[in-house]
Image (spheres, rainbow, N blue to C red):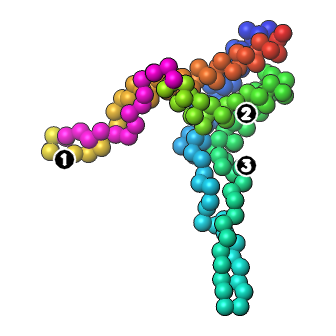
Amino acid sequence: MSASDLLIWGIVIHLVIDWLAQNEWMAVNKATRRERFQPRDFTLTVSPGEVSARELPSRWWDRHPAAYVHAGLHGAAQLFVFPWPAALAIGITHMLIDTRKPVESWSKLIRQTQPLGGAVKVLEARGHDVPKPYFDIGAEVRIWADQVWHIAVIALAALVVSA
């Protein structure tokens, strides 16, 4: 396939996995790093007259479980188009981008509009303040920047594979 064919099909697969196959658990948790120590990550030592607890270090592979699943779907789906090394690279870079740190750092570096986050209180007709969602242009910029980064990775993979 040509680089253009690889790019088009790679983008189609990306959009299907990112927008149709991503559930709420993945979307909400893929950027959240699990805390280094969880309450269950303790060992108890019981000796005569003494009980002690020791924290166990968190394992690196369980820090972003939703991101691993989501990126794994991307890598596996890209196997329909790309050879396995390129599909693996696309999956790994997808996970890194989805932690939001690269996109966040880039947008701050070039001073893009930043997300406001949260909700604003809107005075309703009955005089009650309630949180309402609002349009946040900074969040929109961040979402589209994320998509552009993903597509740029797919384009680079397409160029490398077709060379």
Q: Is residue 2 found left or right of 151 in the rendered image?
A: right
Q: Is residue 104 found left or right of 44 in the rendered image?
A: left
Residue type at the position of mark 3: Trp
Q: Is residue 77 found left or right of 141 in the rendered image?
A: right
Q: Position of residue 116 (x, y in %)?
A: 38, 33
State the image quarter where residue 1 is shown.
top right
* Label 2, label 1: how far apart the Cα atoms are: 47 Å
Name the residue at 77% across, 33% down: 76
Name the residue at 77% across, 12% down: 159
Look at the picture and state if 13 lies above or below 45.
Answer: above
* Label 1, label 3: how far apart the Cα atoms are: 46 Å
State the image quarter where residue 30 is shown.
top right
Let me know if residue 63 appears in the view. Answer: yes
Q: Earlier in the sequence, mark 1 or mark 3?
A: 3
- Magenta stretch bounds: 109-124
State the image quarter where residue 45 is shown.
bottom right
Name the residue at 73% across, 9% down: 4
Look at the picture and state if 158 lies above or below 34.
Answer: above
- Marking on residue 118: none
Q: Position of residue 12 (x, y in %)?
A: 66, 20
Residue type at the position of mark 2: Ile
Residue at the spot of label 2: 92
Q: Position of residue 18 (x, y in %)?
A: 61, 31
Look at the picture and state if 49 lies above or below 152.
Answer: below
Residue at the spot of label 1: 128
